[in-house]
Structures are given as C-alpha cells and as structure tokens.
Amino acid sequence: ACPVGAEAGVTTALREVKLDNKLKLLDSPGIVFPSSTEASKAHRTDEQARLILLNAVSPKEIEDPVPAVSLLLKRLSASQDMFQKLLDVYSLPALMSSNGDPTTDFLVQTVITDWRDGRIQGWMDAPVLLIAPDTAPGAENEGDAPAGDRKEIVKEWAAEFKLEGLWGDASADVQEGEVQAMES
C-alpha cells in the first residue's frame, strides 16, 4: 500500500508497490521545474498560476487564485462546450451574494478546488512540433536537425546493446575475468 492524495507533498520518497507476484510499480515524488528564471512580477504571477493548475502549490499557500482561474478558462475556452458548462455551473444561486453578484473569492476557490479534485475535466491539444524534412536515402545528416528528429525506414532491428563496448577492449577483458572469477 502507498499513501496518495490530491495535495502536493504526499509522496516524499521513492516507493516500490507490489501489484502482483510479477509486477511492481515505482511511486516517486513529482518534480515540477520552473519554466525559466525570469524574475519579473508578471512572469512570477503566470508561473504561480501554472503551478496552481499542476497542483504543485498547496491550497494554503495560494496567494491569488484569480490568475490560475484565468489561465484555466483561457485553456478551456478553445472548447466552447466546456466554457459554457463552467459558466452555467458557477453562476448558480448558491454561489451568489445577497445582491445577486457572484462572490468572487468563493467562486475562484471553488473553481480551483473542483479542478484539483477532478470535477472539471478538460484537456489541451499537444503542441505541434515541426519535423525536419526527410533526407535522401544514403545522405548524411548535416546536423541541421536534432538527432531525435530523424526518420528512416529500416530493414531489420538494430544490433543489441552490449555493455562491453562502452569501456573499450581492456575493461571488457577485466569484466570477463571478474565474471569467470565469480562463477568459480
């Protein structure tokens, strides 16, 4: 068993969870890296909003949830149906003050809580990445495209990975001798 929760910081160490006699699952703490090191106030607000939506900030530590809700609405506004559902749900009379205006603080906290707990479901399309043009068969890659961006049709599987080739022939002989010594 492994403790889980909807708040950041529940998983504090690497854990191995046995699912059955042949399958184990590794549970590790999530790490959210800041997107850059800019220190402008606008950037810090945007970064804080992004971290709130990733649930990397504890609800007690949220200073201003309005930018996070704005970012969420911007992301979900591509889907007009989802945007309309949000407007319908969060304009309920229970969320209104006595004069009929929505109570902003309560409304914003409700949206953040519902997002964190999975009651608001939405997604974004993956960003479109440019693929380098195919090179002619037999042509060398001049290095203008990243190494992971190459496509080619292969006729067979690649050769298997051999550890001995990493350290050269001398260390392969040493390792072979160690293996023989361990076997005897």
Image: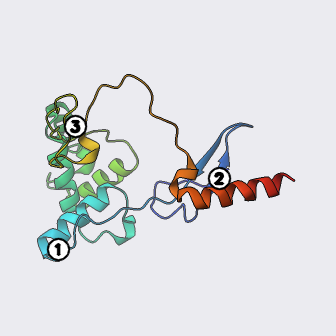
Residue furthest to the top:
155
- Relative to residue 177, is residue 48 drawn left or right? left
Query: Eyeballing the image, is 81 above or below 96?
Result: above
- Secondary structure of residue under mark 1: loop
- Give the spatial CA distance, label 1 vs label 2: 37 Å
Tag 3 near tag 2, CB within 8 Å: no
- Reading the chain from its start, which is encountered first: label 1 or label 2? 2
Q: Are the residues tagged 1 and 3 within 8 Å (C-beta)?
A: no
Question: Which label was assigned to residue 125?
Answer: 3
Left or right: residue 182 compared with residue 82: right
Residue name at image x 16 percent, y 46 percent: 142
Mark 1 vs mark 3, CA separation in Å: 26 Å
Q: Amino acid at mark 3?
A: Asp
Above or below residue 162? Residue 53 is: below
Occupied quadrant, residue 80: top left
Amino acid type, residue under disc 2 in the picture: Glu
Please name the residue shown 40% across and 66% down the image: 58
Mark 2 lies on residue? 16
Q: Which one is earlier in the sequence, the residue at label 1 or at label 3?
A: 1
What is the x, y in percent for residue 96? 21, 51
Residue type at mark 1? Glu
Q: Residues within 10 Å of mark 3 (few under 14, many from 20)?
A: few
